[in-house]
Image (tube, rainbow, N blue to C red):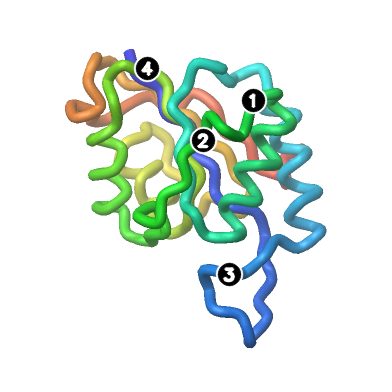
């Protein structure tokens, strides 16, 4: 069995002088990430493959969650390739993950996150909000073989 947790980066600045990759988190985004991290702590397997987009807002979000889950930041891998808004690119990254890990925690961007959740989960979600947490379980032993899974946990900031 494989389990993926997808987390959309927290609310970020929209300052016009910054390029999109370098946008930092807003205080409200930090606060919501802390709340979701606390609420989701019981659903985390510390022996997970952890990957994150290397964009500023996403890497800052990952650091907040990992700190509140008591996971050393050095366990995370930050990838420029996860700076994607395309579900097909996200799917390829997930399907190429090491099968030595049964659990994958992924920090990324919309619309790829919402599209992935709807393509592979069994609950339709109109939009995974910033700091949103969605977990999907797959009845397979290979990431490359994932298909329709079971959405088993959804935590959105508005619900806390």
Q: Residue at x 77, y 40 (%)?
A: 34
Residue at disc 3, secondary structure: helix
Whether residue 69 sits left or right of residue 79 in the image: it is right
Residue at disc 1, secondary structure: loop
Mark 1 / mark 3, whichever is N-terminal: 3
Q: In this orientation, which residue lies closer to the viewer: 44 or 159?
A: 44
**Residue receiving disc 4:** 102
Q: Are marks 2 and 1 in contact (CB under 8 Å)?
A: yes
Q: Residue at x 29, y 26 (%)?
A: 98
Residue at disc 4, secondary structure: loop
Q: Nearer the viewer, mark 4 or mark 2?
A: 2
Q: Are marks 1 and 4 in contact (CB under 8 Å)?
A: no
Q: Is residue 17 above or below residue 2?
A: below
**Residue receiving disc 2:** 76
Q: Nearer the viewer, mark 1 or mark 4?
A: 1
Q: Quadrant of residue 38?
A: top right
Q: How far is disc 3 from disc 4 in space, using C-alphas?
A: 32 Å
Q: In this orientation, which residue lies closer to the viewer: 52 or 43?
A: 52
Q: How far is disc 1 from disc 3 in space, using C-alphas?
A: 24 Å
Mark 2 / mark 1, whichever is N-terminal: 1
Per the rendering, the mark at residue 30 is none
**Residue receiving disc 1:** 71
Q: How far is disc 1 from disc 4 in space, using C-alphas?
A: 17 Å
**Residue receiving disc 3:** 22
């Amino acid at each position: 069995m494989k389990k993926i947790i997808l987390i959309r980066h927290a609310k970020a600045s929209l300052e016009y002088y910054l390029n999109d990759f370098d946008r930092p988190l807003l205080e409200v985004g930090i606060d919501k990430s802390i709340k979701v991290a606390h609420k989701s702590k019981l659903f985390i397997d510390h022996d997970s493959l952890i990957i994150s987009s290397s964009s500023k807002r996403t890497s800052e979000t990952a650091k907040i969650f990992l700190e509140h889950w008591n996971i050393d930041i050095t366990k995370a891998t930050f990838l420029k390739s996860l700076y994607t808004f395309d579900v097909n690119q996200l799917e390829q990254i997930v399907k190429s993950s090491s099968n030595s890990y049964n659990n994958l925690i992924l920090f990324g961007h919309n619309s790829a996150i919402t599209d992935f959740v709807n393509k592979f989960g069994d609950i339709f979600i109109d939009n995974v909000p910033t700091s949103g947490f969605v977990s999907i379980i797959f009845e397979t032993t290979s990431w490359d073989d994932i298909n329709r899974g079971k959405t088993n946990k959804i935590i959105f900031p508005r619900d806390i």
